[in-house]
Amino acid sequence: MALDPETFGILLDTVERFVTERLVPLEAQVAEEDQVPAEIIEEMKELGLFSLSIPEEYGGLGLSMSEEIEVAIRLGGTTPAFRSVFGTNVGIGSQGIVMDGTDAQKEHYLPKLATGEMIASFALTEPEAGSDAGSLKTSAKKDGDHYVLNGTKRFITNAPSADIFTLMARTDPDTPGAKGISAFIVERKSDGLTIGTPDKKMGQQGAKTADVIMEDVRVPAENIIGGVAGVGFKTAMKVLDRGRLHISGVSVGIAERLFRECVTYAAERKQFGKAIADFQLIQAMLADSKAESYAARCMVVDAAKKKDAGENVTLEAACAKMFATEMVGRVADRAVQIFGGAGYISEYPIERLYRDVRLFRIYEGTTQIQQLVIARELMKDA
Ligand code: CAA
């Protein structure tokens, strides 16, 4: 634990206030304009939100996984588009460098990522390589003290604002699958690198994803993460183990937000002469949502504790991601049901959150990939 309990308590209170007083009132505007206002991004920088997971020696808050989960749960109090602004600096964009980077890479990049001066993105997915990440085709051919990269990365969160990419490419064309892959730090300003038009998405407006297209992009060999070729797939998987816990925490936070909205609405909305909360069929939906979000919270808190204790949590992270993201989908669906017609129109936040949470079951590994990971981990003991 990097922060003393009192300071950490202040951080949590500050994040909670920022979410309820600054971000929630702007949700509809962000969805409408598909843009998080620049002044909000500045406030996020001042609050240290870009630096949550970056070690203190590089200017970050250096939160433990357990602490980061508590913050993630509070960030779930609003549309996940806000979290996405700094989410890749805290998670999948920076963590490859934090976990496996050389000292020089850490010293050069992490302080700038911690302040938000630089944005990092994670580029694994390709048009033909989604769940089967090990089949990626982006090539990195050695040419003197550089690699020359060619290929396209798809659905890359924060690509339009990124300054650097933690980018997986195949350095060994003769080795199929995971072993031929290396992780690079690729700078946005590199010649030959272009960003596609931002994708039009079902939800999470304000969070931008786009293609990253590379045509003969020259990357210095020293930008291979950790300086070792052929181990980039493992770096990506370790980063995702951690990211999956963070997404689980956010899912719990959004479930709790939905649940609070439902309780308030059910207490106020009257039908058949009384509040709908008095009807047992409504109570059953509220109870199911509460019990499931509580179960997901316990799961992610436990998995984070194990990670902080140095245990391998590949299995637990997959369990948490699968359960928490499916759970928030069910909670959102019940919320629409409890709100009835009001749950289907954009005047209320429910239909927007319903669309927003749908992505959680897909990115950073689909539910089906989590099932596969869980089963594989179990079979290792057989
Ligand atoms: N930690 C460390 N090492 C790991 C690991 C982990 N969690 N998982 C696998 N590895 C290692 C394995 O031990 C193996 O090493 P050895 O060969 O030395 O034994 C190597 O990596 C290859 O592993 P597998 O044989 O298990 O690889 P696979 O090709 O069968 O694939 C997979 C495994 C689990 C299906 C993996 O491809 C996967 O997780 N797919 C989903 C990809 C994913 O989550 N994509 C999301 C993209 S990011 C995103 O969504 C964010 C955004 O910006 C939108």
Image (cartoon, rainbow, N blue to C red):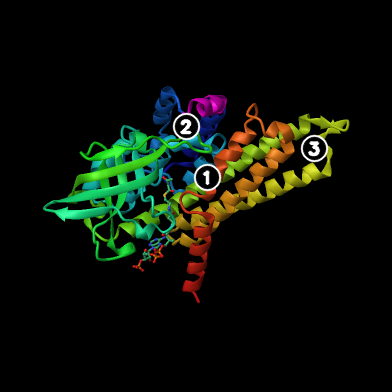
Residue farthest to the bottom, as pictured = 382
Examine the residues drawn in magenta and state their main secondary structure: helix
* First in sequence: mark 2 vs mark 3: 2
Label annotation for residue 240: none
Residue 31 covered by magenta stretch: yes
Q: Nearer the viewer, residue 169 or 239?
A: 169
Q: Amino acid at mark 1?
A: Leu
Q: Residues within 10 Å of mark 2 (few under 14, many from 20)?
A: many
Q: State the image coordinates of residue 300 (x, y, percent, origin top left).
A: 54, 52
Q: Is residue 93 visible?
A: no
- Which residue occupies 68% across, 40% down? 335
Do the residues bearing badges 3 and 1 touch, measured as CB atoms within 8 Å?
no
Q: Is mark 1 within 8 Å of ligand 1?
A: no
Residue farthest to the top, as pictured = 39
Residue for badge 1: 359
- Which residue occupies 78% across, 30% down? 269
Tag nearer the camera, 3 or 1: 1
Q: Is residue 194 visible?
A: yes
Which portion, as a residue range, is magenta? 23-34
Residue for badge 2: 206
Q: Amino acid at mark 2?
A: Gly
